[in-house]
Amino acid sequence: MASPYTRIAEVKGWFNQFCVGFEVVYETNGQRHPVRHVGGDTSNAMNVTLTLDPDEYISGVSGHAGNIIDSLTIRTSKNKSATFGGQGGNPFDF
């Protein structure tokens, strides 16, 4: 029996002038498992989906935050990125 292989397959972010919500989809041995949406009301928010290839991983996270997360940028090992949110707050980079 093959050992389980789990990876992040997709990250979806909802935003307007700040980040409103997130959802992550994990994949284990080809089966997708969405994690419950985290955040607020997304009914009037825009969204962006970052889909990762099977051999790709998240290599960095940056953005701006104050009392809330104003923006979040997720970077991958294949130099893809997605930004959710606006311009306010203080910068951070991981």
Image (cartoon, rainbow, N blue to C red):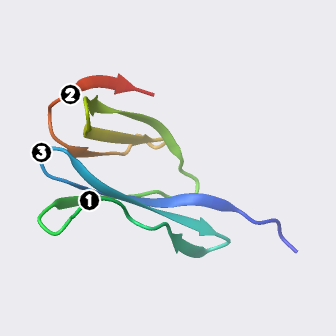
Image spot of residue 60 (x, y percent): 45, 35
Which residue was labeled with disc 3? 17
Image spot of residue 23 (x, y percent): 40, 61
> Is residue 12 visible in this depiction of the protein?
no
Question: What amino acid does circle 1 point to?
Answer: Gly
- The label shown at residue 40 is 1
What is the C-alpha distance between the residues marked 1 and 3? 13 Å
Residue at the image point whose x is 27% and y is 31% from the top: 65
Farthest right residue?
1
Residue at the image point whose x is 58% and y is 67% from the top: 27
Image spot of residue 71 (x, y percent): 24, 39
Question: What amino acid does circle 3 point to?
Answer: Gln
| Quarter of the figure with residue 21 | bottom left
Which residue was labeled with disc 2? 89
What is the C-alpha distance between the residues marked 2 and 1? 19 Å
Farthest front residue?
67
Secondary structure beneath disc 3? loop
